[in-house]
Image (cartoon, grey):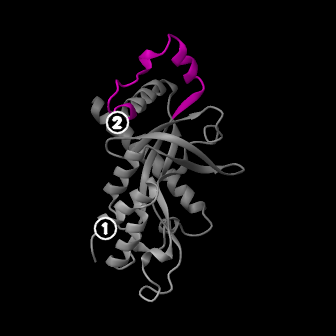
């Protein structure tokens, strides 16, 4: 059998195994799984296309990995590297991390949070003009759902080198750091404390809550107030102003 055909068959079998794990998780739920309920219930905040959500997750490169453990939910704050085709993310965990020691492969969710800011009702306009408003919070968040599985330990060094190269490449005005700067033997010694994993992505959900449910002039006034705030508030204001007019 040609090598390329064998590789394709192996990839197909791997996808089938991952789908089976995800299906098993769904079937064990106490009620039918409604993934939309994980994000904001108002669909107006969930209109961003898959490509925008993935681009945000790629640019952020950091999230909260969650899965179920034998004694309850587990979570870890981790950097990750999204593949070119966004079908998986490679990451690493400390050997002592409970997720690393959980029964894998297993379904998991990678929560990627962006900027957020409090919105005061007063910022929408005078009460007589915009009555009966309440405080809220604007934010951006993307949930990547999939299956987490361990990788062979010989995949760790390429992963950590690729991860550091990606983020070093985003820094302007400096020569990128590389592991070649480490004293001989130091890198292998440190890597003994971590393990490589792959998170295969099956679903992508995003919430961009930016007052899309408000009239254009009301949203503009709130954005103007947020633009006077801290960095996160200013970022939210800029995103609000990018929303198309209704």
Compared to 157, does 71 lie above or below? below
**Residue shown at the point (45%, 89%) measured from the top left:** 128
Decide: few, some or many residues near mark 2? Use Cα within 10 Å; few <14, some 14-19, many ≥20.
few
**Quadrant of the frame with the C terminus:** bottom left
Decide: few, some or many residues near mark 1? Use Cα within 10 Å; few <14, some 14-19, many ≥20.
few
**Residue shown at the point (32%, 33%) measured from the top left:** 172
Farthest bottom residue?
A: 128
**Residue shown at the point (39%, 35%) measured from the top left:** 167
In the image: residue 246, left or right of residue 126: left
Observer able to see residue 142: no
Residue 121 in picture, x, y percent from top left: 49, 76
Residue 14 in picture, x, y percent from top left: 43, 42
**Residue shown at the point (42%, 16%) measured from the top left:** 180
Do callouts 2 and 1 mark residues in contact (Cβ within 8 Å)?
no
Observer able to see residue 232: yes
- Between 59 and 2, the residue placed more toward the observer is 59
Of label 2 and label 1, which has the lower sequence position? 2
Element type at mark 2? loop
Mark count: 2
Mark pair 2, 1: CA separation: 27 Å
* Residue linked to disc 2: 170
* Residue linked to disc 1: 243
Q: Which residues are magenta?
A: 167-196
Residue 34 in picture, x, y percent from top left: 51, 68
Residue 110 in picture, x, y percent from top left: 50, 50
Element type at mark 1? loop
In the image: residue 200, left or right of residue 51: right
- As for residue 18 lying within the magenta part, the answer is no
- Between 169 and 126, the residue placed more toward the observer is 126
């Amino acid at each position: 059998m040609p090598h390329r055909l064998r590789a394709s068959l192996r990839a197909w079998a791997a996808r089938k195994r991952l789908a089976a794990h995800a299906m098993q998780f769904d079937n064990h739920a106490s009620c039918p799984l409604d993934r939309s309920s994980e994000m904001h219930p108002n669909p107006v905040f969930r209109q961003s296309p898959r490509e925008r959500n993935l681009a945000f997750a790629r640019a952020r490169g950091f999230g909260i990995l969650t899965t179920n453990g034998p004694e309850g939910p587990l979570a870890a704050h981790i950097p990750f590297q999204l593949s070119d085709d966004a079908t998986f993310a490679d990451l690493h965990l400390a050997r002592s991390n409970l997720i690393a020691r959980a029964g894998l492969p297993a379904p998991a969710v990678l929560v990627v949070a962006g900027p957020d800011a409090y919105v005061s009702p007063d910022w929408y306009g005078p009460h007589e003009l915009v009555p009966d408003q309440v405080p809220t919070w604007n934010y951006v968040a993307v949930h990547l759902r999939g299956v987490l599985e361990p990788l062979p330990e010989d995949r760790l060094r390429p992963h950590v080198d690729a991860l550091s190269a990606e983020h070093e490449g985003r820094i302007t005005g400096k020569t990128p750091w590389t592991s070649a700067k480490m004293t001989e033997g130091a890198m292998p010694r440190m890597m003994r404390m971590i393990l490589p994993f792959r998170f295969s992505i099956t679903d992508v959900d995003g919430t961009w809550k930016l007052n899309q449910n408000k009239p254009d002039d009301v949203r503009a006034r709130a954005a103007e107030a947020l633009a006077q705030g801290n960095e996160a508030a200013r970022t939210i204001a800029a995103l609000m102003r990018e929303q198309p007019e209704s």
